[in-house]
């Protein structure tokens, strides 16, 4: 029993989201909130991948399209679409649009294969590993690559 507890501590929780037909994992420690789609106010002259801003309980939060940032087709909003509010220690909160929030999974180091960035294809720059959740593979976002370019809108 002791042994099980020590291995369990090394596991991290990820929220699995769908973007298009693919599944991605976001480290749960970065997630502040998950909200339903709401009116996004466009901001002129912002980066192409910024959809605009939302007002969440009095706080104005910039919202980014992960699809646009990764060079995919534009977002199509459905009843399952969500805005995930990410929080960071040294930066302001940031909302990202996802097609669907699926589940929370636990992955340990043995469940994750690191990704080498030899090709530097746009989509791959944001992935730092592939998680194995049973038979399914989940690409794990490197959230810091999103905020490295988190220019103000």
Image (cartoon, rainbow, N blue to C red):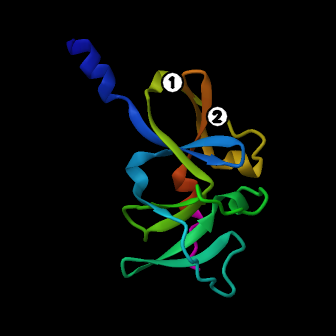
Instruction: Determine which of the numbered discs, if any, sits on residue 60 in the image.
Output: none
Count the marks. 2
Q: Is residue 45 left or right of residue 27?
A: right
**Which quarter of the figure is the C terminus placed in?**
bottom right
Q: Is residue 139 above or below residue 35?
A: above
Pointer 1: residues within 10 angstroms few (<14), some, or many (20+)? some
Q: Give the residue at x 58% y 73%.
A: 151
Q: Which of 118/35 is in front?
A: 35
Gap in Å between the C-alphas at discs 1 and 2?
A: 13 Å
Q: x, y percentage for residue 110?
A: 48, 21
Q: Residue furthest left?
A: 2
Q: Is residue 75 left or right of residue 100?
A: right
Q: Is residue 136 above or below residue 147?
A: above
Quarter of the image for residue 70 reads bottom right
Q: Give the residue at x 63% y 49%.
A: 126
Q: Name the residue tied to disc 1.
A: 111
Label 1 secondary element: helix
Residue 107 is one of the magenta-drawn residues: no
Label 2 secondary element: loop
Q: Give the residue at x 78% y 41%.
A: 119
Q: Which of 7/145 is in front?
A: 7
Tell me where the magenta segment starts and ends, as one range.
Answer: 148-153
Circles 1 and 2: CB distance less than 8 Å?
no
Q: x, y percentage for residue 88?
A: 41, 61
Q: x, y percentage for residue 29?
A: 38, 49
Q: Residue furthest bottom?
A: 44
Instruction: Determine which of the numbered discs, if any, sits on residue 115 in the image.
Output: 2
Q: Is residue 79 above or below residue 138?
A: below
Q: Give the residue at x 53% y 74%.
A: 62
Specify the principal SS of the magenta part.
Answer: loop
């Amino acid at each position: 029993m002791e042994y099980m507890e020590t291995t369990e501590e090394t596991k991290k929780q990820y929220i699995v989201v769908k973007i298009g037909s693919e599944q991605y994992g976001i480290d749960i420690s970065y997630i502040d909130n998950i909200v339903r789609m709401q009116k996004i106010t466009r901001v002129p002259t912002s980066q192409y991948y910024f959809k605009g801003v939302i007002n969440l309980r009095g706080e104005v939060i910039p919202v980014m399209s992960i699809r646009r940032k990764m060079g995919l087709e534009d977002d199509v909003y459905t009843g399952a679409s969500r805005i995930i509010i990410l929080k960071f220690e040294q930066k302001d909160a940031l909302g990202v649009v996802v097609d669907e929030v699926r589940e929370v999974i636990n992955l340990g180091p043995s469940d994750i294969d690191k990704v080498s960035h030899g090709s530097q294809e746009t989509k791959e720059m944001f992935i730092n590993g592939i998680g194995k959740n049973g038979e399914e593979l989940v690409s794990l976002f490197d959230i810091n690559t999103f905020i490295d370019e988190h220019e103000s809108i």
